[in-house]
Each structure stands twice: as structure tokens, then as C-alpha cells.
Amino acid sequence: MGEIDRKRWVEGRVDSVHRWTEKLYSIRVHADINPFTAGQFTKLGLEIDGELVSRPYSFVNAPDDDMLEFYFVIVPDGPLTSRMVQLQPDDAIQVMRNGSGFLTLNEVPDARHLWMLSTGTAIGPFLSILRTDVPWQRFEKIVLVHAVRLAEELSFSKIIESISASHPAQFQFIPFVSREAAQGALQARIPAAIEDGRLEGRAGMTLSAEDSQVMLCGNPDMVKDTRTVLKARGLERNRRRAPGHVSVENYW
Ligand SMILES: Cc1cc2nc3c(=O)[nH]c(=O)nc-3n(C[C@H](O)[C@H](O)[C@H](O)COP(=O)(O)OP(=O)(O)OC[C@H]3O[C@@H](n4cnc5c(N)ncnc54)[C@H](O)[C@@H]3O)c2cc1C
Ligand SMILES: NC(=O)c1ccc[n+]([C@@H]2O[C@H](COP(=O)([O-])OP(=O)(O)OC[C@H]3O[C@@H](n4cnc5c(N)ncnc54)[C@H](OP(=O)(O)O)[C@@H]3O)[C@@H](O)[C@H]2O)c1
């Protein structure tokens, strides 16, 4: 294999691989990377058949944690995730030295309410953000939505409970489970539940251009369909040169 560019890549060590379900895992890694901003991603890479194969993964940990954590789903026939799941403690993993990405609160204009809407593994960057002080200082109310196919895919319940316990009046977690009935969860997709009012009904808050900032992350079809329903409510894409209400990150 060619030399790995050490200006860009740090050799990290696997601490542990935690299995949430047959398909969903967290990997915890020690790596001496540069500081990142909550909500950003880095790249993880493994040498496979003499090549460095790498993909982007969002940080789940807060920026001041020593241990890095990434949450991933095994993609059938995916070259990297099928290898990542076989890693053992102390194995080497390449981690890009600098974080990237703009799904960060410094890109989000002020508002009363912050809505964080995710599918699947894309809850990760929101957990990183929620484990910093900034969102609690900037927003009156914060809603975290995690939309999954099956109830067993609602990972991180302990972390979410602890965020909730620290900010009981400010924070709400709303799970969506689309492919089975699950207690406490909405059985729906995010855009449909915005259109028919179920999400706002559950949150007890309205999505409006006046009061809301929305962050969307995960399945690109969810991101696209949600942008469409939000646009119909007057919420526009947020851009640096033209501040709006909706900040997005697609996972594929
Ligand atoms: C900015 C960014 C951040 C990302 N952060 C994460 C993360 O934190 N966790 C994570 O698991 N993945 C994340 N991804 C996706 C990740 O980079 C890989 O694409 C994924 O892990 C699959 O890698 P692979 O080599 O096995 O298959 P690939 O060949 O890369 O992917 C094959 C196909 O799998 C599907 N797919 C990819 N990622 C996902 C996913 N997360 N959930 C459901 N279906 C998916 C898509 O249909 C994709 O075309 C992120 C992607 C981007 C662009
Ligand atoms: N085995 C298979 O047949 C099969 C098929 C597709 C993908 N996969 C693989 O399985 C994994 C899926 O991961 P995942 O379940 O975490 O992610 P996902 O497919 O993105 O599903 C997560 C949630 O997003 C919802 N969603 C999907 N499209 C949406 C849209 N257009 N608008 C709003 N919500 C939408 C899903 O609802 P719904 O339940 O209503 O879709 C589900 O609740 C991937 O690795 C993928 O490659 C497997």
C-alpha cells in the first residue's frame, strides 16, 4: 500500500466495538486528532487489500471527550462497515486529523426553538451537539427526533435520558418507529408527520419561520421530502450568504 499521508491521517486505536442490534454498532477509538466542532464528521479508514478505504462518520462524542465514538450501520456489501464491525480492541484504525462539515450550531441563526430531525445513524451529530453547553444557552426549547424502522433501533436511550434529566423543561425527545407499533413512538415518516400536524401536536410547538430553526440529517430522501414540506410553511434552506431556517446534511 502507498504511504498514508500523516499530515491528514492519525493512526488511532480501537477501544471497543459495542453491538446495539445485529446491524447497528458504536466504535470507540483513541486518536490524537485536532479539535472539532460538535456536529462535524471525520473520516475513518482501514487498509483493505493494500488500499486505504475511508468514509465519513459523524462524531457522537462531545468535543471535550478523550474517547471518540462513531455510530454506524452495517451496509450489506458495504466495503468499510463490514470490516469495521470485525475490529478488536487495540486494532489500528485511521482517523482524519481534522473534522469537517457545517451541521454545527455556529452555522444556525438564532431562534426560540431548535428542531433536530434525524433518521437512523444520523442521530449521532445531534447527540454530540446536545452534550455541549451552547444549545441550552441559545434556544428556549429543543426537540430531538430519531426516526428508525424498528423500535430496537432506538439506540442511546441512556444518553438521551440523561440529557432530558439535565434539561427537563427545555428538551423533548420524540421517537419515530415506521415499521411496527412501538409504545411512545409516532408510527410515521418525518415529512408526513409535519404535513398532518402530528409532530407539532406531539411537541406542543409550531414549526414556523418566525420561531424555528431546523437541522436535518440522514437519509437524503427524508432530507429532500422534509425540505419540501418545510418550504411550504415558509422555512427556507439556511445558507451563509442567505440565512434561512433549515440546515441539512445528507449521509449518502
Ligand atoms: C457527512 C457524512 C457523515 C456520515 N456519517 C455517518 C455516520 O455517522 N454513521 C454511519 O453509519 N454512516 C455515516 N455516513 C455514511 C458512511 O460514510 C458510509 O457511506 C457508510 O458507513 C457505508 O459505508 P460502506 O463502505 O460500507 O458502503 P458505501 O458503499 O459507502 O454505501 C453504500 C450504500 O449504503 C447506504 N448507506 C450508507 N450509509 C448509510 C447509513 N448511515 N444508513 C443507512 N444507509 C446507508 C446508501 O444507500 C449507500 O449508497 C456518513 C456520510 C456522510 C456523507
Ligand atoms: N434489506 C433490505 O431490504 C434493505 C433495503 C433498503 C436498505 N437497506 C439497508 O439497510 C440500512 C437501512 O438503514 P436504516 O433503517 O438505518 O435507514 P433508513 O432506510 O434511512 O430508515 C430510517 C428511517 O427513515 C425513514 N425514511 C426512509 N425514507 C424516507 C423518506 N423519503 N422520508 C422520510 N423518512 C424516510 C424510514 O421509514 P420507512 O420505514 O417508511 O422506510 C425509517 O423510519 C442501510 O444499510 C441500507 O443500505 C436494506
Image (cartoon, rainbow, N blue to C red):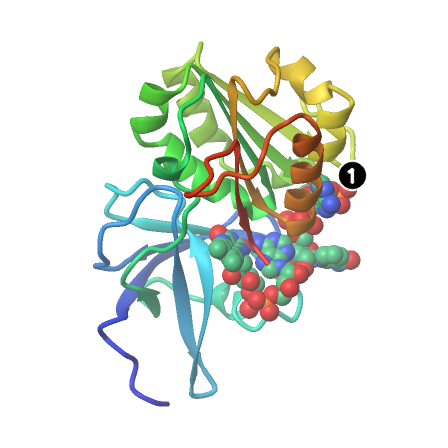
Query: Residue 188's x, y, as percent?
Result: 76, 31
Q: Is residue 46 above or below residue 242?
A: below
Instruction: Count the labels in the image.
Output: 1
Q: Is residue 170 above or below residue 157?
A: above
Q: Nearer the viewer, residue 148 or 40?
A: 40
The answer to whether residue 188 is seen in the rendering is no
Query: Residue 176's x, y, as percent?
Result: 67, 31
Write down which quadrant ligand 1 falls in. Answer: bottom right
Image side of residue 232 versus residue 133, left or right: right
Mark 1: secondary structure: loop
Q: Which quarter shows the C terminus?
A: bottom right
At 25% from the left and 59% from the top, the residue drawn is: 31
The answer to whether residue 123 is seen in the rendering is yes
Q: Is residue 196 above or below residue 77?
A: above
Q: Nearer the viewer, residue 102 or 14?
A: 102
Image side of residue 161 versus residue 153, left or right: left
Looking at the rendered structure, the kind of residue marked 1 is: Arg
Q: Which quarter shows the N terminus?
A: bottom left
Q: Which residue is mark 1?
A: 179
Quadrant of the image occupied by residue 199: top right
Q: Counting other residues with Cα less than 10 Å from the Cα at mark 1, is it few (<14), some (14-19), or many (20 or more)? A: few
At 50% from the left and 38% from the top, the residue drawn is: 238
Q: Nearer the viewer, residue 196 or 60?
A: 196
Image side of residue 249 versus residue 223, left or right: left
Q: Is residue 110 above or below residue 239?
A: above
At 39% from the left and 41% from the top, the residue drawn is: 104
Query: Residue 234's x, y, as percent?
Result: 64, 27
Mark 1 and ligand 2: say if the CB distance to the nearest ligand atom is below 8 Å. yes
Query: Residue 4's x, y, as percent?
Result: 30, 81
At 45% from the left and 16% from the top, the residue drawn is: 112
